[in-house]
Structures are given as C-alpha cells and as structure tokens.
Amino acid sequence: MRKVLIAANWKMYKTPAEAKAFIDAFLPLVKDHTRDEIALFPSVTSLATVIAAAKGSNVSVGCQNIHFAEEGAYTGETSANMLTAIGGTHTLVGHSERRQYFAETDEIVNKKLHTALKHGLVPIVCVGEVLAQREGGKTEEVLRTQTVGAFVGITPETAKTIVIAYEPVWAIGTGKTATPEMAVEAHKIIRAEVAKLLGQPAADKMRILYGGSVKPDNASSLLNEVEIDGALVGGASLKPDSFAGIVQY
Ligand code: 13P
C-alpha cells in the first residue's frame, strides 16, 4: 500500500510571522493524524521558522525549489545543502510555475532531481499538460515526455523516495479541478511510463499525487481513488482549517 501524502505549496505567500501563525493553528488540528503524511512547502524566508515550529510533529517541511549545483555563483538560488542544513527534508522539483516563468526544462528538472536524491531529500516531481495540449489531444504525449525527461539516469534503487505530482496546468488556481476520472487516467499514463523505465514493482510503489484546485469539498472524491496517492495543494492550503479539512478528507 502507498501511504497518502498531502502537501501544501504556499508559493509566494506568507511572511515568517504569518507562517508561524499558520503552524500554531494547524498543528493542533492534525496532531493525531497518522493515516497520511503531511508536508508543507513555505517560501525560503519562512523555512527556518516553519521547520523549528514543526519539529517533533507529524508535519514535514521542504523547499519549493532547489538549484541543481552544489554551490556557486547563482544569485538568488538555494542549494540542497542549504536546505538540509536547516532541517528541510523535501523539495518540489519542476513545478509548472517554474517551467512556465523560470524556463525550467525537462533537462533541468532531471538535474535537480538527481541533486535532491544525492542529498537525501524527498523530491516531488511535478508534471502536467497545459490547456492547449489537453484540447489538442496531446496530454498523454506530454506526460510521457515529461516523465521520461525527469527520470533520465534514475534507477529502481534511487527512485525509492521519488514522488510524482500530476498537476494539469489548466486546473491550477483556476477553480477547475480535473474530475477523478481524468486524474486517474493521467496517473495511469504516468505509472505505465514509470513501469517502462524502472519496472512494474518500482512503478507500483511510486506515489503519484494530484494537484490543481484541490479543496476540502472535492478532496475525498479524488483521494478515495486508489490511483491517487495524495494531493499537492496551493490556494486551499493557505488557511489552517481549510488545509486540515483536506488532510482529514
Ligand atoms: P491550486 O491548489 O491553487 O490550484 O494550486 C495547485 C498547485 O499548483 C500546487 O502546487
């Protein structure tokens, strides 16, 4: 059985004080929740605050993005080592907003994935089609290409901790959620591609999360599908009661 992971991507929201207020309200709401894993992805300036506040709890904390290099002249970037040094355990890799606004290619996503694994971080690799690709009948091709591109050089051994998030770009921040049937179909395509690359046992173990307008009122219909191993939540993760409602789907 794959353990469900419910993750909050706060994007470029919340000061450290706002992040601390969230954690103080959120932890009591989920303190007895052992059924699923919970992870928060605050912005870089709130990482240390959230990691300290979540210490010893059932909530993990990670970065929304890392650079693939160990260190160097990369103004504005964060290394994997910087993240692990302050106690971060997870990282998002290749979120569609990184691909769209910061020109991240499948090759860069692949490099970042290798760096994350080298540093023992749990990576959540994001894939997903844009609206024109879905409407043009290209969803399957896009998901296969992004999965293959991300997984270059990955073996069944190194893949053990990798999580994939299927986030159809047209569903992000739009209030348009993929139906459970659409998400399941996409997850099956991704899992079949992972099976081709790494073998069926590795594919069966890999968690594939859904992201895109997940809310407390649609979480259970998505998460009750056996193909959907969790959620990556943006807007609805910014309020403690709303995110706790999703965790307790
Ligand atoms: P929304 O939940 O706001 O649609 O964002 C999804 C997302 O991009 C999570 O990474």
Image: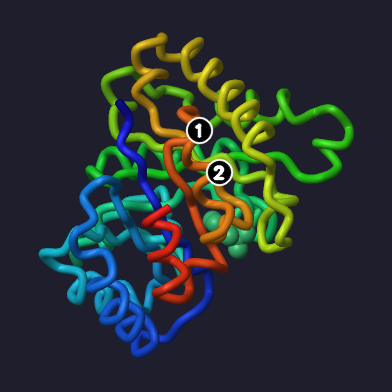
Residue 62 occupies quadrant:
bottom left
Q: Residue furthest left?
A: 56
Residue position for label 2: 221
Give the quadrant of the N terminus: top left
Ligand 1 shows up in the quarter that is bottom right
Secondary structure, mark 1, is: loop
Is label 2's Cβ within 8 Å of ligand 1?
A: no
The residues bearing labels 1 and 2 have C-alpha atoms spaced at a distance of 7 Å
Residue found at x 43% / y 66%: 243
Q: Residue furthest bottom?
A: 17
**Identity, as a three-letter code, of the amino acid under mark 2:** Ser
Residue 199 occupies quadrant:
top left
Residue position for label 1: 225
Residue found at x 75% / y 51%: 170
Q: Where is residue 113? Give x, y as percent.
A: 41, 39
Q: Where is residue 128? Give x, y as percent.
A: 65, 40
Q: Where is residue 46? Give x, y as percent.
A: 35, 78
Which of the two residues, 26 or 60, is positioned nearer the viewer here? 26
Residue found at x 60% / y 29%: 184
Which of the two residues, 51 or 104, is positioned nearer the viewer here? 51
Question: Marks 1 and 2: CB-CB under 8 Å?
Answer: yes
Secondary structure, mark 2, is: helix
Residue found at x 58% / y 53%: 218
Which of the two residues, 218 or 73, is positioned nearer the viewer here? 218
Residue 167 can be seen in this image: yes
Q: Residues within 10 Å of mark 1 (few under 14, many from 20)?
A: some
Residue 75 can be seen in this image: no
Name above or below for residue 215 compared with residue 219: below
Q: Residues within 10 Å of mark 2 (few under 14, many from 20)?
A: few
